[in-house]
Image (cartoon, grey):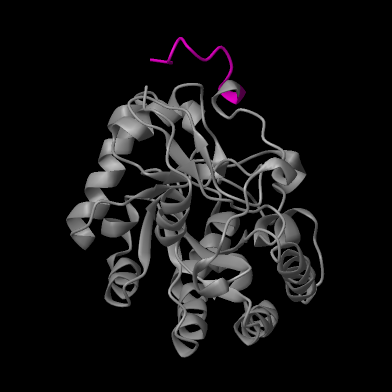
Amino acid sequence: MTDPAFKLLSDRVPYSAIVDRPPLKGPDGARVLLWLIVNVEHWSIERAMPRTVLSPPMGQPLLPDLPNWSWHEFGMRVGFWRILSVLEKRKIRPTMAINGVVCSSYPRIASAARDLNWEFMGHGFVQGPMHKVEDQPAAIAQTIQAIKSFTGKHPRGWESPGLTETDATIDHLSAAGVDYVADWILDEQPCYIMASPKPVISVPYTVEVNDIPVFGLQNHRSDEFYHRGVAQLDRLIADGAESTRVMAVSVHAYLTGVPHRIAGFEKLLDYIQSRPEVKIMTGEDIADWYRAQVPPPNAR
């Protein structure tokens, strides 16, 4: 049920100009806190695919959609392991946005991430918009329980599939014990989202340094991810001299994990690690840092 105090979903985040806020101080003097999100999803072959690389023949959608399911499945069989190797080599601990069902449908992937101590962030139980979920509290609880049973830890973060939320989603997440979300791509610093029973932190996510818009929608060259990431980071480092900024880098195994794109990703990571003004953190670490500097408003 939607909190009646908020007529619109947008009412939950009062407007705040970044130039009017007290400056935030990053840990160890960092100007930019960077978190890397690896998205791991379950695409069911009996359903329409969340996105496609090939249009259906003669414009007629068909099920099962073998070529587009296979496109994603390549990421689970090959691309994920390429990304994991790149991160492990650089000792980077990412946040993994994971469909809850992946813990049982792809246990090899979930086990590898768990064994490397990656942060697990809820990403729905199966891949599909929150607007189509009949019982959101049950689906959220199912996702959290799947992750908790597999890792031994209650996930603190949530990224809705497609960043989708209905008017009531944030209340359901708050009630389920979620501390932060990645759906609200509206700032370069965290902020509180009003929810019941307690506010939830928005940790800045991205549709800019994100391989779905860059490659899946905008069809850029393989090296665009590197160039865009460097340009984004350089500007945030400059602006972060006054108040620390947060930058996200988001990847999917079926896009970034292909042979012709992985080198650009590696090059971007090497550049990130070369900048002393940058501290790589997980989503939960950034949420804790922000809460320590900006106390939450009174819970409703």
Residue 186: name its quadrant: top right
Please give the name of the residue rendered at 71% of the width and 41% of the height, measured from the top-left corner: 20
Tell which of 44 and 12 is nearer to you.
Answer: 12
Q: Position of residue 131 (x, y in %)?
A: 50, 27
On-image quarter of the N terminus: top left
Tell which of 17 and 281 is nearer to you.
Answer: 17
Could you tell me how many numbered marks the image carries?
Answer: 0
Against 25, is 160 above or below?
above
Q: Position of residue 36 (x, y in %)?
A: 53, 67
**Is-magenta flag for residue 16?**
no
Name the magenta segment's main secondary structure.
loop
Question: What segment is highlighted magenta in the picture?
Answer: 1-10
| Residue 5 in view (yes/no) | yes
Q: Position of residue 9 (x, y in %)?
A: 56, 22
Please give the name of the residue rendered at 21% of the width and 59% of the height, measured from the top-left corner: 150
| Residue 63 in view (yes/no) | no
Please give the name of the residue rendered at 34% of the width and 42% of the height, measured from the top-left corner: 178
Please give the name of the residue rendered at 27% of the width and 53% of the height, measured from the top-left corner: 147
On-image quarter of the C terminus: top left
Tell which of 264 and 55 is nearer to you.
Answer: 264
Against 66, is 259 above or below?
below
Work out which residue is located at the far bottom of the displayed protein and give it. Answer: 89
Work out which residue is located at the far front of the displayed protein and give it. Answer: 22
Tell which of 3 and 276 is nearer to you.
Answer: 276
Residue 2: name its quadrant: top left
Q: Position of residue 182 (x, y in %)?
A: 52, 47
**Is-magenta flag for residue 5?**
yes
